[in-house]
Image (cartoon, rainbow, N blue to C red):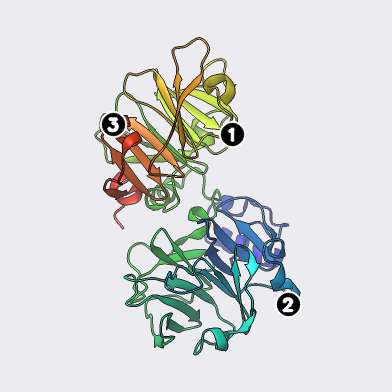
Amino acid sequence: MKLISHLLCLALAVALVPSSLCDHHEDDPYDRCNIEMDAITMNEDGVPYFFKGDHLFKGFHGKAEFSNESFAEMDDDHHLGHVDAAFIMHYEDGSDHDHIFFFLDNKVFSYYDHKLEDGYPKNISEAFPGIPDHLDAAVECPKPDCEEHSIIFFKGLHIYHFNIKNKAVDDVEFQSMPNCTSAFRFMNHYYCFHGHEFSKFDPKTGEVHGKYPKEARGYFMRCEFGKEGNQSVHKDRETCSRVHLDAITSDHDGHMYAYRAHYFLHKAEGSSDLITDQISHVFKDMDDEVDAVFSYQDHLHMIHGDQVFSYKASEPHTKQEGYPQTVKEELDLEGPIDAAFVCEDHHIAHVIKGDKIYDVELNATSRVATNEQTIPLFKKVHAAMCDAQGVTVVVGHHYYRFASLEVFLHAKALPQQHTVAEEMFDCDH
């Protein structure tokens, strides 16, 4: 791995790519920012699992752990050098709903709730007749994305559509697709990973539309690549990323501020231009990701872990004296916080933790979290803001707009679903 990493950096240097691409731990064979993943799948709770060798990365950031800590029997029954392919089954008419399947050489393992199912491992030819051994990738494709609920298997140039219901196999050709080393269905889109890049594809035809391939580590791995002088790369990536926003707010002038991983996005009222930069470049002493943010009295109150930072909303974004403070001091709650917002000229911060929302009177000398309520439609909110149009709630790479706080708190059905990339950030692909 060291040799590969050194060769990568040498090639990048020759190509005049910014050296920051190599500013990761070259001596760490399991630095997710320097490796190509062997297999990717979701777990039953919607958390992505990235596999490399005998290690597993859970989620979009964080360190690796041994795969056998979560899936012990694969190592007991089959020396776990690496996972060839993996997918989670959502076919509700069968007995395998929410089972995760792993393919290793000529064997397939089926897990439910991290426990190996009886009768497994099996030969791939037994569980999926007509599918070859030593696969490159696999991904589930439910109706109507595919004509019938299917599993798409990849091996070299061969693509196999396996009909779950009747076990028929169609050997198809995706002419515009690169060879996939792993595949992933995320937020109803299909991604083929090849090296450090990925392409979004149509599961029926294999067609790749838009500006692909893209850098996988900037979208799915939350790695920092490209610093000053590479703003066009940042802007394209952040505008069209399908990774959820961590925080979002709007000030009294209608300017929008959003945060994803280590990046800050700003869109002025009435402008279609999106400005992106690293959070640490814009906000002094703020070196980590932002969990939540709300606008109040011309300041951006940014929450990370158990701390609250306050900065002027206007440029330059100078830090308010006396900050950071603890979330407990500021909001009478323990961090971390999922989302927070203040509506128009009111003085109440509405703070979301899990499926609960609290009110905090910001004018009070001693702030107290009161009026705990259960959010009716969402178990998890990634970001939220309140402006003249109402309350906007971001879940995954979609957002939902409610006419008012009261409508949000008493809604019995989801309003129209919008896409963050296309409709909020004007991504053209």
Mark 1: which secondary structure?
A: loop
Direction from residue 183 to residue 390 in the image, left or right: left
Q: Circle 2: is it few (<14), some (14-19), or many (20+) Cα within 10 Å? A: few
Q: Earlier in the sequence, mark 3 or mark 1?
A: 1
Disc 1 marks which residue?
305
Count residues near mark 1 (Cα–Cα under 10 Å), then give few for <14, some for 14-19, many for 20+.
some
Among the 4 quarters of the image, the one containing residue 251: top left
Amino acid type shown at disc 3: Ser
* Depth check, front residue: 122 or 161: 122
Q: How many marks?
A: 3
The residue that appears at 52% across and 84% down in the rendered structure is 128
Report the residue marked by disc 3: 404
User: Any mark on residue 77, and which?
Assistant: 2
Query: Which of 386/13 is in front?
Result: 386
Look at the picture and state if 192 lies above or below 23.
below
Q: Residue at x 32, y 30 (%)?
A: 405
Is residue 8 among the parts visible in the rendering?
Answer: yes
Give the distance between the C-alpha atoms of the residues marked 2 and 3, in whole angstroms: 56 Å
